[in-house]
Structure formats: C-alpha cells, structure tokens
Image (tube, helix red, strand yellow):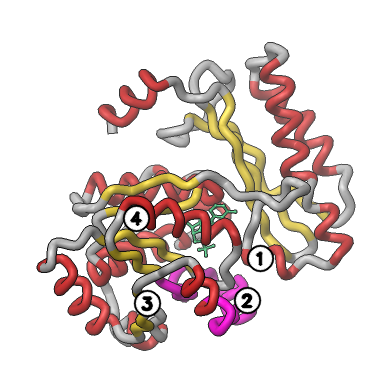
C-alpha cells in the first residue's frame, strides 16, 4: 500500500493508472475506521483493479460550533486496517494542501440539501459536495462507494454526479451495525457507557416503525408519534428530527405508499447521531424506474 500526502501526487498517480487501463475504485472517509468503512472497501475491491481510500477530516463540512477539532483521529490504526483490507493507495492529505487560502469556488446542491441534516447543519452539504467533487478530480474513480448510513449524503452525491456529469458510478453500501443494533459511527467513541446503552433507542424506534408498517399502518403520523414517545423516554437523548421522506426525492410524505426513508437525528448528550431505514422496500421494477427518472 502506498500512502499519498499531496493532491498533485494523487492526481498524477490516478492519471497513470487510467492510462494503463485500470479500473479505480474509491472509498472516501474521514478516518477512525470501523467495520462500516471496511465493508465499503470490500464492495469496491470486488469491482475494481485498484482500490483508493482517502482519509480527510474535511473542515468545510463542519459548522463553527461543531466537532472538527475533537473529531476522533488515529492514523496509525487506520493505516494498519487499510493494509489488511488490501487498499492500494491511501490518500491522506493535509487540510492546507486541499484548500487554497483564498478558495472561492463551491459545489452546492440546492434541493435535496434543504431538508433533514441540511436544515440542521447549514453549509454542511456544500462542504461535502465540494470535497467529494475535488476528491473525484484527484482520484478519478470509475466507481465510488458511499454508505446508506448517511442516506441524505448518498442521494446528494448521486444527484451531483448526475447534474455535473462526473464519469463515476456511485455504489450504495448497506448500514453496518454493532451486535445490539447501533449503527457504527466514528462518533460513537464520544459516548459514555451509559449513553452508549441509551443510543440503541434509534434502532429500537426504527424497528417499531417497521413492525407497525408490516401490521398495516401506512399513515406516517401514528408511526412517528410512537417513535417520538420511545426516544423521548430515554435519558439524555434529544430528538433533532424524525422524518418520513420519499426515498429518492427526499420530499416529506404523509403516507407510506412508495419506498419511504425514515430518517432520525438525535443528540445523546452532546453527540449527534443519525440512523435510517426504508419502509415499503423498492421492487426491482421500481428501482429501474427510479434509476431512469434520475
Ligand atoms: P465518514 O468517515 O463518517 O465520513 O464515512 C465515510 C463513509 O463511510 C460514508 O460513505 C459513510 O456513509 C460510510 N459509513 C459510515 N458509517 C457506516 C456504517 N455504519 N455502515 C455503512 N457505511 C458507513
């Protein structure tokens, strides 16, 4: 595995690989790797000749009062995990190398970004789109794998790729969970043992929603109020949002009469956690129709 520190070196390396006809698979991350990240690497590995992983805690996607400085980092451990995962190139740039002091061009998605985490974290998805666009230009991937854990981010990246004609296929990786159901996240490290136990309420609320839907409840409000009640009863957990949105357009829905993304964001103490699931799963035919409509 080769570690690359500068954007120029990364781009030159990628261009060489392209000239040699290699299929480049890419997994962008912010490091402090866990099984969720590793699962994306395995998905990419199966479909490419050369696997590139980036580790970059992107300052432009953090708000002024967010956890940029505190974000967990452990490069030595990440490096070892990437070696085990048979990563070919690990791109690990310094923030000062990634953004010019007077950088003034941004990539902004204007529709899907206005709801859910986009509403709670102004500017977040502008930072995400900009860094992912830059990384695509540097790594030149044929395919890039993003996790369903960040469902809104995934759909925004798919939209960016469509609207700006990036020559890259976006592959969706399923959510990887701890044995008790908590979605894996680098931020889980912030949780005290008590908070860690309490955090399971996200998954429990999603499971309750699935049960109600399967029993025939297709109206959103009764399901949402059960979820709200369950989560509000847990100490130290405050709801940011529980939303039911069309799986593709992220438009709010009142009835589950199509594939609907149930998205939750909470704070457990001061740690922000998100989770989601899809109700009314997509049939093969619907998937094709959605893809064509994109
Ligand atoms: P992050 O390092 O948090 O920016 O995440 C990098 C990539 O890993 C993103 O595409 C995330 O959606 C994905 N990811 C994070 N956690 C999980 C998880 N538990 N399961 C699957 N993918 C994940």
Total label count? 4
Is 61 inside the magenta-drawn segment?
yes
State the CA–CA distance, disc 3 to disc 1: 22 Å
Is 44 inside the magenta-drawn segment?
no
Sequence-first tag of 2 and 1: 2
State the CA–CA distance, disc 1 to disc 4: 23 Å
Residue at which label 1 appears: 187
State the CA–CA distance, disc 3 to disc 4: 14 Å
Label 3 environment density (alpha carbons within 10 Å; few <14, some 14–19, many ≥20)? many
Query: Pointers 3 and 4 in contact (CB under 8 A)?
Result: no
Sequence-first tag of 4 and 2: 2
Residue at which label 2 appears: 72
SS majority, magenta? loop
Can you see residue 106?
no
Q: Point out residue 102 in the picture as x, y percentages from the top left corner.
A: 29, 84
Write down the region rendered in magenta. Answer: 54-78
Query: Pointers 3 and 1 in contact (CB under 8 A)?
Result: no
Query: Pointers 3 and 2 in contact (CB under 8 A)?
Result: no
Label 2 environment density (alpha carbons within 10 Å; few <14, some 14–19, many ≥20)? some
Residue that appears at 77% across and 58% down? 268
Residue 289, relative to residue 205: is it above or below?
above
Residue 58, relative to residue 258: is it above or below?
below
Judge: label 1 CB < 8 Å from ligand 1: yes
Residue that appears at 52% across and 44% down? 174
State the CA–CA distance, disc 2 to disc 1: 7 Å
Residue at which label 4 appears: 144
State the CA–CA distance, disc 3 to disc 2: 18 Å
Query: Pointers 2 and 1 in contact (CB under 8 A)?
Result: yes
Query: Residue 91: which numbered mark, if any?
Result: 3
Name the mark nearer the viewer: 4 or 2.
4
């Amino acid at each position: 595995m080769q570690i690359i520190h500068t954007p120029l070196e990364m781009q030159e390396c990628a261009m060489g690989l392209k000239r040699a006809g290699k299929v480049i698979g890419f997994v962008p991350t912010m490091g402090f790797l866990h099984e969720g990240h590793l699962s994306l690497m395995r998905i990419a590995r199966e479909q490419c000749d050369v696997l590139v992983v980036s580790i970059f805690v992107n300052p432009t996607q953090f708000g002024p009062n967010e956890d940029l400085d505190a974000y967990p980092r452990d490069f030595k451990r990440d490096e070892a995990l990437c070696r085990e995962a048979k990563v070919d190139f690990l791109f690990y740039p310094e923030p000062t190398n990634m953004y010019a002091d007077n950088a003034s061009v941004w990539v902004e998605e204007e529709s899907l970004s206005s709801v859910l985490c986009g509403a709670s974290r102004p500017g977040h998805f502008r930072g995400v789109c900009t860094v992912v666009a830059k990384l695509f230009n540097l790594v030149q991937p044929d395919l890039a794998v993003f996790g369903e854990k960040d469902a809104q981010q995934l759909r925004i990246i798919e939209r960016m790729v469509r609207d700006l004609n990036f020559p890259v296929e976006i592959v969706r990786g399923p959510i990887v969970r701890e044995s008790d159901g908590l979605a894996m996240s680098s931020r889980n490290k912030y949780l005290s043992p008590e908070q860690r136990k309490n955090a399971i309420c996200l998954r429990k609320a999603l499971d309750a929603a699935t049960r109600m839907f399967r029993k025939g409840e297709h109206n959103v409000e009764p399901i949402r109020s059960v979820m709200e009640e369950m989560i509000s009863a847990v100490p130290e957990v405050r709801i940011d949002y529980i939303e039911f949105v069309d799986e593709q357009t992220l438009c709010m829905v009142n009835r589950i009469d199509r594939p609907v993304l149930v998205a939750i964001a909470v704070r457990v103490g001061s740690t922000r956690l998100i989770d989601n699931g899809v109700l009314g799963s997509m049939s093969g035919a619907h998937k094709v129709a959605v893809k064509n409509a994109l």
